[in-house]
Image: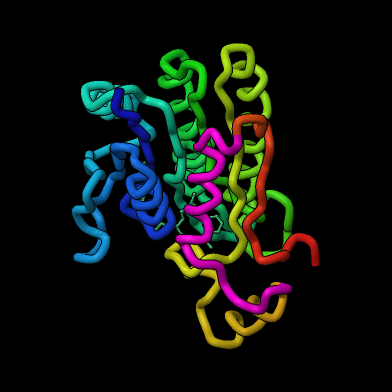
Amino acid sequence: MTSVALVTGAAGGIGRAIAQRLADAGHVVVGGDLAPPASETDGPHEGIVDVHLDVTDDDSIAAALTTATELGELRTVVNCAAVLSAARTPNLTDSQLDHQIDVNLAGTIRVCRAVTDRLGSGGSIVNIGSISATLGGAPGVGVYAATKAGIEGFTRALACELGPRGARANVVSPGFVDAPMAGLLRSDPDTEARIVASVPLRRLGRPDEIAEVVEFLASERASYVSGATVRVDGGRVAS
Ligand SMILES: NC(=O)c1ccc[n+]([C@@H]2O[C@H](COP(=O)([O-])OP(=O)(O)OC[C@H]3O[C@@H](n4cnc5c(N)ncnc54)[C@H](O)[C@@H]3O)[C@@H](O)[C@H]2O)c1
């Protein structure tokens, strides 16, 4: 039976690379996002079915799952949708607080809630975290960091629920990646140079380097990996 993967945030920089990598590995990918793919190069790709998806809306999640199950057997789910709204804590508005929690953490949990009972043996969930869950250094990203730390805790608990039926859940935690969400931290050349200098590999990551690890964790090559957070950060957290 056709193996189907659902990827949220699939029009974004890293999400698109993940969708393309999973499609290249033979999955039919349902790529869900609020927005359509950004550019011609990120546009229609063989093996990817783009759908409108809002991870804050259960009906929208259910519609994406209907598409997925019509295409084959749902075996892989990647939660990559997220927003980042930087504000120092005293300046944080209610809307910045609520929206980041609603999309990043609650959105990931909503999608997992909807798919968990559909994943059988060999099923795999990969939630996208961030090294901000571990590092506190970037100004104004407290809520975003909290949502990513929450994803790690949730995913460990989910791995315990899924394990007895042979399904797995893991987190991939990117460092600084040449993709839109790093934009806020790259506001000027000095900041970018400082960020690059802080990374042992002395460069930003590429979206395809994140996608490669996601595809590995989704595959049977990672059949005994569950409840893990795998950092793909050029050594940043180690430094
Ligand atoms: N770029 C980085 O340096 C970096 C570092 C660590 C973690 N990450 C994580 O990687 C992921 C992708 O980041 P990116 O840099 O590609 O950013 P991006 O903004 O290109 O991707 C995020 C995508 O999520 C979508 N989205 C937002 N709200 C949504 C909603 N309610 N429903 C469905 N989709 C929604 C956006 O439309 C966008 O396409 C995110 O989870 C981010 O937290 C990125």
Q: In this view, which residue lies farthest toward the bottom?
A: 190
At x 60%, y 31%, the residue is 223
At x 30%, y 22%, the residue is 1
Asked whether the viewer can see residue 68, the reply is yes
**Nearest the eye: 68 or 79:** 68
* Res 137 → quadrant: bottom right
Give percent across and percent down for residue 221.
57, 38
Give percent across and percent down for residue 203.
60, 77
* Res 37 → quadrant: bottom left
18 above or below 120? below
**Nearest the eye: 49 or 146:** 49
Q: Is residue 213 magenta?
A: yes
Asked whether the viewer can see residue 90, the reply is no
At x 34%, y 52%, the residue is 20
Give percent across and percent down for residue 213.
55, 50
Query: With 58 as the anchor, is 233 left or right in this view?
Result: right
Predominant secondary structure, magenta span: helix
Q: Quadrant of the C terminus?
A: bottom right
Give percent across and percent down for residue 196.
64, 78
56 above or below 121? below
Q: Is residue 166 magenta?
A: no
At x 38%, y 41%, the residue is 8
73 above or below 196? above
**Looking at the image, how many numbered discs can be counted on the residues?**
0
Specify how the rendered protein is coloured.
Answer: rainbow
Give the residues drawn in magenta, as a range: 200-222
Query: With 51 as the anchor, is 225 left or right in this view?
Result: right
